Amino acid sequence: MTARSRASLWLVSGATLLFVVEARAQSQTPPPEEMPPGQNAEVPPPEQGQVYVPPPGYPAPGADLNPGLSSSSKPITDTSRSQDGFDLNQPSGRSSVVTGNKGASAVLGGGAGGGGRAVSVPPIHLVRRGDTLWDLSARYYGNPYEWPRVWSYNAHIDNPHWIYPGDQVRMRRPGPGGDLRLGSPLGREAGLINRRPLVPGNTVFLRTQGFIGDPEKDVWGELVGAREDQMLLSDGNNVYLTMREGVTVAPGQRLTVFRTVRQPQRVEGARKVPGEIVAIKGTVRIDQFDPKSRVARGKIIESVDVIERGAKVGPVDRELDVVPPRTNQNTVWARVLTSMYPHVYMGQNQVVFIDRGSADGLAPGNRLSVVRRGDAWRRSLVTTTTMARERVLVDVPERVRIETTPLHGDELKFPEEIIGELRVLRVERYSSIALVTVSHREIVVGDRCIARRGY
């Protein structure tokens, strides 16, 4: 029995041409011309033992026809299993999708049991060109809409829309009760003091600016040195403090590190109040204190800016509780001195200073109406050209002409209008800190406000 080979041309799936090389025994199957009448004379389908050889220019059976495409762009024929390596082939039971290459930093959370695990989520992210809080939230949390949470962890970021290359962004909240989904909780030494979340309408947290009512009393000491050989100090540095006479500190006590910026500006018709506005630099924890030398050793546990030798330390209150309204017991006139930041215009939800305090009968919770007298449009003409007063007369029979808008009447006799409302948060003896709760118009330095008795 002799064997012979025969090459047949097959059409597979209506598209791919394949040659079938058959190794068949002559005695097993007769040639087509010898087949019994009534049987199909075409080439029979491939049998076991046949070898498929693709013709020149055609891929082998089973070859990937889309090798140049990314995994997420390749067509998928079997929807019963994941073929997309871009999603890291998450195990069953995981509901969230994490983008990135295999081995990249990511967060796999939101499983069926509510738990999750962290994959290389750093406590600190070094900002690179093009980074935004939106992108960082999407990268590490899997949800870009959680960017306010990242902002709440970073007291040094004043504007969440602006972060710069080289900035350090904290990605975790330290302390017990922190983000357990992001791994084991970080300690207080991780760079952020453990404070309760900010609840809108409940607490105002001062990030980088503060106020001391009495510089002689509120400045407890000075940062004079550090154990590390560096000029610019930050989280984790061990520092030395000298405390003034009469001040005693204990291990574990936390003090605010700050430097003075400015005094409330002088306003015509207002009282010159004591106190200073300070720039907050961070928080230091006292580890050791020698009452004889008055030298304390501490550790910086929070830094919202670079800390240098010569910075002051003291019990600067950074949380101002928004107390409920309280009925005014006295009628008190006051003036707006300045805001926490040197803004020209102030509005709703900003903190301002007024030149009346506890000695004048004010208390936390009192409400003051900001009043202003006069024509608002007329005052705006001070910064414009004379053309701002000109108007065109068109409904006239003769040629179109221009006339100047008249400004009659005495503004000082106009009635006072309420343009905003303040609520007192904290009182000093001769000044107070208040929150702008309502503003119909911009508030400026020197505006008059009144707490009416019984309101």
Image (cartoon, rainbow, N blue to C red):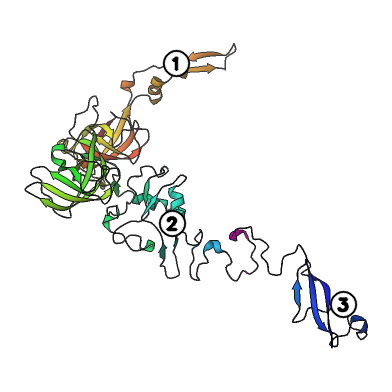
Give the residue number, with chain letter if any, for mark 2.
140
**In contact (CB < 8 Å): disc 2 and disc 3:** no
Between disc 2 and disc 1, whose residue precedes? Answer: 2
Q: Amino acid at mark 1?
A: Thr
Q: Amino acid at mark 3?
A: Glu
| Quadrant housing the C terminus | top left
Judged left or right of residue 44, residue 311 is: left
Which stretch did the figure color magenta? Answer: 61-82
Residue 452 can be seen, yes or no? no
Q: CA distance from mark 2 to mark 1?
A: 57 Å
Say which residue appears at 33% left-offset and 60% top-offset: 178
Percent across and percent down for residue 5 are 83, 78
Give the residue number, with chain letter if any, for mark 1.
386
**In contact (CB < 8 Å): disc 2 and disc 1:** no
| Quadrant housing the N terminus | bottom right
Q: Nearer the viewer, mark 2 or mark 3?
A: 3
Percent across and percent down for residue 319 are 25, 47
- When the figure is inspected, residue 118 is found, relative to residue 384, above or below; the finding is below
Question: Looking at the rendering, which quadrant does residue 162 occupy?
Answer: top left
Give the numbered dot on residue 42. Answer: 3
Is residue 152 inside the magenta stretch?
A: no
